[in-house]
């Protein structure tokens, strides 16, 4: 039976990942992430209209009637009968006035959610989120380097840690790029649940990558052949395990995405994208990267030896 030559065709996988990462970085640089009130500060009001939902213009007029600045207000329809209002920070009086104004437009209005976050708290949350991601990545790199400390040849243990971080970056930048696109075209905002999803993706990605690398470590101790052949063998030995585990996880996430309600949809979507990307990268990127690095080191060492030899002759 023909087997997919993962390591041999690594240039194809690098091209695919390069396009994904390049597109994600481009989207992030051009549009950025649409940040929720957790990071920017402000008030978020979600309401349910028992009858037909008023038009956006009518709801904006209700905001104006409550003496709230409409220039910084965003009205977003949700489903057939709900709406979300992203507003500047409201006082209790302004909140009550807005609800009264909405009820004047559409008699039966139910408040589903009302949250207010100050700008200082939002800035602190944003800073803590970035710090948390940086600390998690650094800790993962140290842990992997320590776990593979007994592997020194032909690839040093710290290189396993670096490859793991590269793979983790690959797995989180893709969902971030997708949410930059969704934020621009669909108004999707990110908040603390998105940060939780990214951290979850990191953990899942690292686990999947380490499974393959651990099999490489075992094969180096008991198998013979070139490093490329041993890595290829490890990939095929762990392929079904990684695929089956991810498939089962994704089936559950798809069920939550379609039937879990709007409040979980963005969080679940980020997990679906990240776990699918992580499964791909642990098989098609992490292991081939080790082979590419080993070949580059060997070629570089040979070139250096030739230069030293010619220098001594002179």
Image: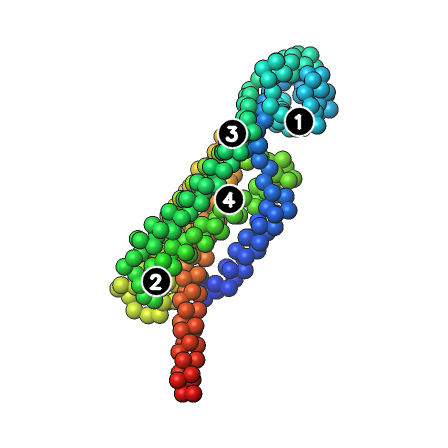
Q: CA distance from mark 2 to mark 1?
A: 55 Å
Name the foreground residue: 112 vs 31.
31
Mark 4 surroundings within 10 Å by alpha-carbon count, few (fewer than 14), some (14 through 19), many (20 or more): some
Name the foreground residue: 61 vs 228.
61
Mark 2 surroundings within 10 Å by alpha-carbon count, few (fewer than 14), some (14 through 19), many (20 or more): some
Kindly indicate whether the residue at mark 1 contacts the one at mark 2 (C-beta within 8 angstroms).
no
Tell me the element at label 2: loop
Name the foreground residue: 258 vs 158.
158
Mark 3 surroundings within 10 Å by alpha-carbon count, few (fewer than 14), some (14 through 19), many (20 or more): some
Viewer-side label of 2, 4? 2
- Counting residues from the start of the chain, the first of labels 4 and 3 encountered is 3
Residue indicated by mark 2: 156
Viewer-side label of 1, 3? 3
**Percent of width and height locating residue 251:** 45, 40
* Mark drawn on residue 282: none
Residue at image location 34% in from the left, 50% down from the top: 143
Q: Can residue 33 be seen?
A: yes
Residue at image location 55% in from the left, 53% down from the top: 21
When asked about the image quadrant of residue 302, the answer is: bottom left
Tell me the element at label 4: helix
Residue at image location 44% in from the left, 69% down from the top: 296
Quadrant where the image shows the C terminus: bottom left
Residue indicated by mark 4: 273
């Amino acid at each position: 039976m023909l087997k997919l030559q993962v390591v041999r065709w690594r240039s194809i996988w690098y091209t695919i990942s390069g396009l994904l990462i390049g597109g994600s970085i481009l989207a992030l640089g051009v549009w950025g992430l649409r940040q929720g009130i957790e990071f920017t500060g402000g008030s978020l009001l979600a309401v349910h209209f028992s009858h037909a939902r008023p038009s956006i213009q009518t709801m904006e007029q209700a905001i104006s009637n409550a003496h709230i600045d409409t220039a910084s207000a965003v009205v977003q329809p949700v489903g057939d009968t709900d709406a979300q209002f992203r507003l500047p920070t409201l006082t209790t009086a302004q909140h009550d006035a807005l609800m009264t104004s909405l009820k004047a437009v559409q008699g039966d209005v139910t408040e589903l959610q009302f949250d207010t976050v100050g700008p200082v708290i939002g800035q602190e949350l944003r800073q803590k989120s970035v710090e948390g991601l940086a600390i998690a990545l650094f800790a993962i790199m140290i842990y992997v380097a320590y776990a593979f400390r007994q592997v020194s040849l032909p690839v040093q243990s710290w290189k396993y840690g670096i490859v793991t971080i590269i793979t983790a970056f690959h797995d989180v930048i893709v969902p971030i790029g997708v949410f930059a696109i969704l934020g621009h075209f669909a108004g999707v905002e990110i908040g603390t649940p998105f940060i939780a999803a990214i951290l979850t993706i990191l953990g899942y990605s690292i686990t999947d990558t380490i499974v393959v690398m651990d099999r490489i470590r075992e094969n180096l101790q008991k198998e013979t052949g070139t490093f490329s052949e041993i890595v290829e063998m490890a990939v095929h030995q762990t392929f079904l395990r990684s695929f089956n585990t991810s498939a089962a996880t994704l089936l559950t996430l798809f069920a939550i995405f379609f039937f879990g309600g709007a409040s979980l949809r963005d969080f679940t979507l980020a997990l679906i994208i990240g776990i699918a990307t992580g499964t791909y990268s642990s098989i098609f990127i992490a292991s081939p990267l080790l082979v590419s690095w080993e070949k580059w080191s060997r070629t570089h060492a040979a070139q250096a030896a030739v230069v030293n030899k010619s220098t001594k002759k002179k």
